Amino acid sequence: MYPYSTLSAAAKEIRLLTLMPGSGNDSIEGSLSTESLQSGPIYEALSYVWGSADNKPNLIIDGVTFAVTQNLHAALKRLRQQHQSRLLWVDAICINQDDTSEKSFQVAMMSEIYSKTIKGLLWLGEESQIPVQTVSPEQSLAVDRMLKDADEVIAKLSKDMMATLLPSDPEFDTWKSWSVLPPPAPDHSLADAFRITRTAPCVWHNDDSDIATLNLSVAASMEDDAVFHAFCLFRLLSAGHHLKDIPYFQLEEEGQETYRTFGRRAAHWICTRDWWGRIWTVQECVLPDDCTVIYGPVTAPWSMFLDAIANFQHHRSSCCAGIHTAAEIYDMLNYQVDTILELRAIQDQRRRGEEILLGELVRQFRYRQATDPRDKLYALIPLVTSWNGLPPLEPHYEKSFAPVDAFRQGVIKAIEVSRTLDILCQLETPVSKANTPPPSWIPDFAQKAAHPGTLDHFMKQIHLYNACGGVMATPKVAADSVLVLEGYCVDALKRASTMMVDIKHQDRMETLSWWHQVAEEECGKANEGWRRSFWRTICGDSILRERVNFVDGGVPVPSELRRVSESDETVFNQWCAAHRLNHLQTTIDAEDDTEFPNIISKPVGAIHYAISVTTRDKRFIVSTKGRMGVAPKMALVTIPTPDEIFILAGGKTPFVLRPAGLRDVPGTTGMQPCYTLIGDCYLEGIMDGEAMAEYSANKKPVYLV
């Protein structure tokens, strides 16, 4: 075991690894030194995924054998220079991982460690030594497990709903058909013969010097180098080209496979490396002023990836919205919009000196993974720029401090700092499988989720609303399990329609048609303007601004959302025609044009984006007072007491709560009505504080369990 010396927290001391020169199969050797961040040491900081703890190879540190994971060993082997040493900060080596006290204060210093590095080295992983499938058996099994879990949830939900219905009820047969698990899907994961192979060394610069490298893309000698073509794809995107002008977006003839096909698949391979989905890598690529992406023998500026995805997002939601291209490249890049643009947004906010609160970060990056669940919070602390005068969240790695204790600590801190309930929004974390599930208001971040992030979409949308009229949250916690808020019930669910499953485009369009039918059945007679209410509901009364923002020398980034106006109704009708959903148009005599009019116009792409933001993984609802809305997928019309809709102090949106019966709440007299938090919702007519006129007369303590 390496004999670590003690670090001084007061002096802001860290350890740095001097990586000794070497080449080939020479043993990797180095030495550790103690430096104070106050003295301005010059070093590079490595960002990587620890990887499996099995079969650890050894380094030699100050003459002592030091075991590291295979991924770290591969990274150091690549980073080692042949003739001179290199000064690095590497967490697994520079922090005594067996000292919880040291680990806690070093984590608290991460902001300075990564901010003061001269360069962040973003290690995606070593190139494949033998050909490997672009979709691994592990990935295929993960998808199978996700679908199986979803089938089980739907089947259980269906059986519960059947218990509340009579066989003569119109929806009984539908629920019955969903109550039977479908047969397992055939395994096609090994049908694709394409494999990722080794790639030629290459250095990208994200400037004009890359032109010569790009010219090699048509060379016969590079045709089979799929990884090279993947980087060409990102480089062309970073230059701002229209999607139709980039060869890798062009469709091949049916059954034909070319370098473009392989480049797309290799891009998918690179963008699904574990590095992209880990919580620690957020700060490690955001805080440094300069970063380099490294995949085996290939290096590229981090800015190339940022620019590429920003340009893709700009083009796909505006001028190139109607371009038909290979589905796999769109799916992969859509995934990267989720994972990369949110990183760029945080980086730009920090550079502009804007306020970044813990709750925003937690909600934005909650889908990333960590070996220690507590790191879902602690890894984000360095990115926070304001605690509004309150003490910062303090990391606790003691064994007695369980993950649920950290999650409770984080939720309360986020509410206290922001005085809002934003942290409670978008709580679509899978149900906890723990023996004692946490309270409904404490997310179980330890559970994996299907999405890589909240798409950075809801972060923009939530700030458009003000359901609570600016009244601030004043949270209290009773017995560590009951969150006490203030609010009142404004409505309840009358009908909850099909959930929007984010899988196939055609399925999403069919779901919108079903939602429209439900809206007509429930509101068509009582509300003459129900068609207009429906379109505003499914886009959350929001749309992308038509202007385009430019930063960093003319690189476009996504515009913010705004509330819709009357003129946007025409855009919505065009969107309906473009997607052959004419029956959703707001006027019966709207122009019927099945030739996809204006689908490549910016406004139509903007409305499509807003609808996707609002409806993803949600359920269309109609309330007892005839309001349309979009609610969490777990919202139900339970019998005899349906889910209720509350306005809560600090909530920019209404919340769906489920009655949980009378309970003894410490600090109160008698039994109190308690509720389970289902989640936030959009409900037409009360998003701008309209319900606050009756707030003072009806407000009461609301107990969430």
Image (cartoon, grey):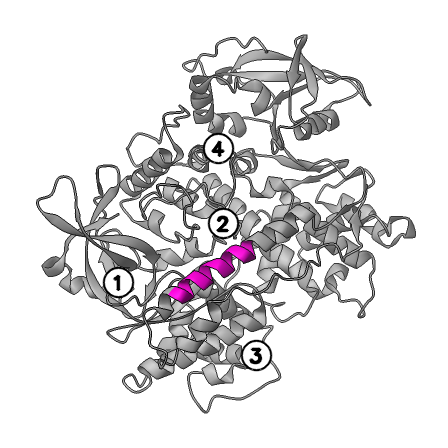
Rounded to the nearest angstrom, the CA distance separating label 1 from label 2 is: 25 Å
Q: Nearer the viewer, residue 77 or 570?
A: 77
Residue at (42%, 45%) from the top-left corner? 433
Reading the chain from its start, which is encountered first: label 4 or label 2? 4
Reading the chain from its start, which is encountered first: label 1 or label 3? 3
Disc sitting over residue 578 in the figure: 3
- Identify which amino acid the numbered label 2 is placed on: Ala
- Quadrant for residue 476, please give it: top left
Q: Is residue 630 visible?
A: no
Rounded to the nearest angstrom, the CA distance separating label 4 from label 2 is: 16 Å
Q: Is residue 149 magenta?
A: yes
Q: Is residue 248 magenta?
A: no
Q: Secondary structure at mark 2?
A: loop
Residue at (37%, 70%) from the top-left corner? 162
The magenta segment is 146-159
Where 541 sits versus 358, above or below? below
- Identify which amino acid the numbered label 1 is placed on: Ile
**Is the magenta region chiefly helix, strand or loop?**
helix
Q: Nearer the viewer, mark 1 or mark 3?
A: 1
Q: Position of residue 624 (x, y in %)?
A: 25, 73
Where 48 sits versus 240, above or below? above
Q: Secondary structure at mark 4?
A: loop
Reading the chain from its start, which is encountered first: label 1 or label 4? 4
The residue pinned by badge 2 equals 449
Rounded to the nearest angstrom, the CA distance separating label 2 from label 3 is: 32 Å
Which residue is the extreme one toward the bottom? 589
Rounded to the nearest angstrom, the CA distance separating label 4 from label 3 is: 47 Å
The residue pinned by badge 1 equals 645
Q: Nearer the viewer, residue 447 or 221?
A: 447
